[in-house]
Image (tube, rainbow, N blue to C red):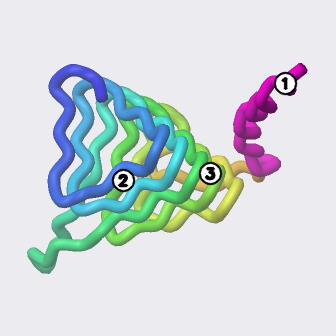
Amino acid sequence: MGNFGEVKAARLGAGTKMHHFSYIGDASVGKRVNIGAGTITMNYTAKRTKERTEIGDDAFIGSDSLLRAPIRIGKGAITGGGSVVTRDVADGAVAVGVPARTIKRVAPAKPEPAPAKAEPAKKR
């Protein structure tokens, strides 16, 4: 987690990186997610209700993205830097702009395989 980041009522999955000046509140973030600097989850609605943000495994959230809850960012999805995301982003989709729109789909990222375990040395 970078400098001046805040996580409130949220869970970050294993291997997730959250960079400086970000606020992630009332959210569930998957594994191996990259959350760019300055990203904010906006979780209060105009009706003054608190909602949640869901971010799937292997997603990439560009710097200065604003995620307006309730929202779901799918597995392997990407948001462009400075995007204002007001609608769900499907698995493997790339969303950019203000407001963010899906412009294409990408192949899902494959997690790196776990390192092989060394076999014990044989006795002579």
Instruction: Please state the horizontal and vertical placement of residue 95, each as a whole percent of the image.
Output: 59, 49
Label for residue 123? 1
Q: Nearer the viewer, residue 39 or 124?
A: 124
Q: Which residues are magenta?
A: 106-124
Magenta stretch: residue 24 in it? Answer: no
Q: Nearer the viewer, residue 99 or 43?
A: 43
Disc nearer the start of the sequence (3/2): 2
- Residue at image location 57% in from the left, 47% down from the top: 59
Left or right: where 20 falls relative to 118: left
Magenta stretch: residue 108 in it? Answer: yes
Disc nearer the start of the sequence (1/3): 3
Instruction: Please state the horizontal and vertical placement of residue 39, each as a whole percent of the image.
Output: 33, 38
Find disc 2 in the rendering and name its residue. Answer: 67
Q: Residue at the far left: name it.
A: 48
- Residue at image location 71% in from the left, 43% down from the top: 111
Q: In whole angstroms, how far apart are the C-alphas of marks 1 and 3?
A: 50 Å
Check if mark 2's residue and mark 1's residue have beta carbons within 8 Å: no
Find disc 3 in the rendering and name its residue. Answer: 77
Disc nearer the start of the sequence (2/1): 2
**Circle 2: residue type:** Leu
> On the image, which quarter does residue 102 sit in?
bottom right
